[in-house]
Amino acid sequence: MSEPQSGTSLKEVPVKEAIGLRLAHDLTQIIPGQFKGRLFKKGHIVTEADIPRLLDIGKEHIYIMQLGEGDLHEDEAAMRMAAALQGQGTKMTDPHEGKVAIKSDLNVPGLAVIDASLVHAINHLGEIALATLRTHSVVMPGGQLAATRVVPLFVPEEKVAAVEELVDNYRLLHEGRSPVRVRPLRSFRIGLLTTGGEVFSGRIQDKFGPAVRRIVEALGSEIAEQRFSPDDRQIIVKEIHYLLSQQYDMIVVTGGMSVDPDDRTPAAIKEAGASIVSYGTPMLPGSMLLIGYLEGKPIMGLPGCVMHDPYTSFDALLPRILAGDVITREDIVQMGYGGLHGC
Ligand SMILES: Nc1nc2c(c(=O)[nH]1)N[C@H]1C(S)=C(S)[C@@H](COP(=O)(O)OP(=O)(O)OC[C@H]3O[C@@H](n4cnc5c(N)ncnc54)[C@H](O)[C@@H]3O)O[C@H]1N2
Ligand code: MOO
């Protein structure tokens, strides 16, 4: 069988007659719950012992491929696309089953910054799979943020050239930056103020401090100091000013963020002098979160759900702040769409 336009020829050979022949691509085995991966590598020379294993994975024939001029093998196409997309903080892997991964090259956690419209434009070309994380996802060191693959076993070289052109044009308009990159998270020393009369008096044990510490430390930052206050606006203001005087990179206040008369935190943050970007975030859980800036430092009011739920508006915003973004009202507005995570 051959492909007349491209000049690439693919010959099907029954596996039983394939001893001594070279495999044209990686071959995959999947055993649900146990294994998924490459059983044979591209270029492997088939031996007699391989025959039952090939039959076990449903291969009664293999391809012998003669690549025509102007065509690219799936591995080479995936590599060229990944190479074109290399950007700040990324590295690429070798091809595996026709796929090349783009991973974080940083030794600290990072923020994935991915241009959705360019990803859509590339996937519009057809026969191409560029899969990425959502922009602003956290990527741990060595973690994957994108992967490239073409769908057929070989594609015309122009297909990959079209991807390269889209990326080149993007770079021209964006100071050379790739549409797929990772920005490092800085390590912040954070001042934490826990409000709540029931905690201050010792009536119940603080559960907020450990929860915030876990989230912050997972991103490579630390709680430098934790203070406690009753539900008293003046005391909360005083404590915020104390934390500000300690030159911490950010201030976080917990509790007292909702609608009860004892919920003093939003008013106290305002009275402390912060300019409020938003009190309220259209995301659930975390709708009562406040974000503002006090003398240029981010200050956040965290509602009770941060202590309880696995993913809240705090988890969504903190990585951006650590990456150096200044959060705007527009950023907050955009959190509502896709922002329902339970509650
Ligand atoms: N009628 C309404 N009810 C609620 C609303 C609302 O808009 N209308 N908002 C809900 C949302 S969203 C959240 S989140 C919660 C909690 O909001 P707060 O941040 O005001 O939380 P508190 O009232 O201070 O406390 C709630 C709960 O959590 C316990 N807590 C608080 N801090 C600590 C701590 N450091 N350690 C351990 N436990 C703590 C506190 O004792 C209460 O049990 O409100 C919803 N309801
Ligand atoms: O702030 Mo609550 O913050 O949505 O459960």
Image (tube, rainbow, N blue to C red):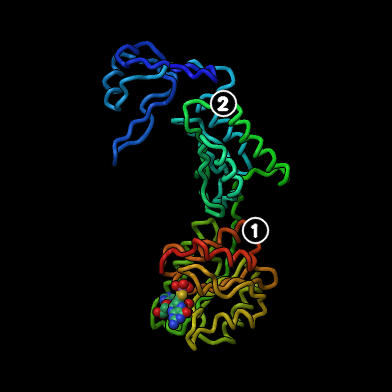
The residue located at (61%, 50%) in the rendering is 183
Q: Is mark 2 within 8 Å of ligand 2?
A: no
Residue 121 lies, in percent from the top left, at 59, 43
Q: CA distance from mark 1 to mark 2?
A: 42 Å
Q: Which mark is residue 244?
A: none
Task: Kindly check if marks 1 and 2 are in contact, taking CB atoms under 8 A apart as contact.
Answer: no
Residue 286 lies, in percent from the top left, at 49, 70
Q: Is mark 1 within 8 Å of ligand 2?
A: no
Residue 291 lies, in percent from the top left, at 59, 71
Residue 104 lies, in percent from the top left, at 55, 43
Q: In what element is the residue under mark 1?
A: loop
Badge 1 is on which residue?
A: 324
> Where is residue 158, by image quadrant?
top right
- The amino acid beneath tag 1 is Gly
Q: Residues within 10 Å of mark 2 (few under 14, many from 20)?
A: some
- Is residue 25 depicted above or below 277 in this figure? above
Q: Which one is earlier in the sequence, the residue at label 1 or at label 2?
A: 2
- The answer to which of 1 and 64 lies nearer the viewer is 1
- The answer to which of 167 and 128 lies nearer the viewer is 128
The residue located at (64%, 75%) in the rendering is 276
Badge 2 is on which residue?
A: 156
- The amino acid beneath tag 2 is Pro
- Tally the marks: 2
> Where is residue 16, by image quadrant?
top left
- Is residue 326 depicted above or below 104 in this figure? below
Check the picture and name the quadrant holding the C terminus.
bottom left
Q: In what element is the residue under mark 2?
A: strand
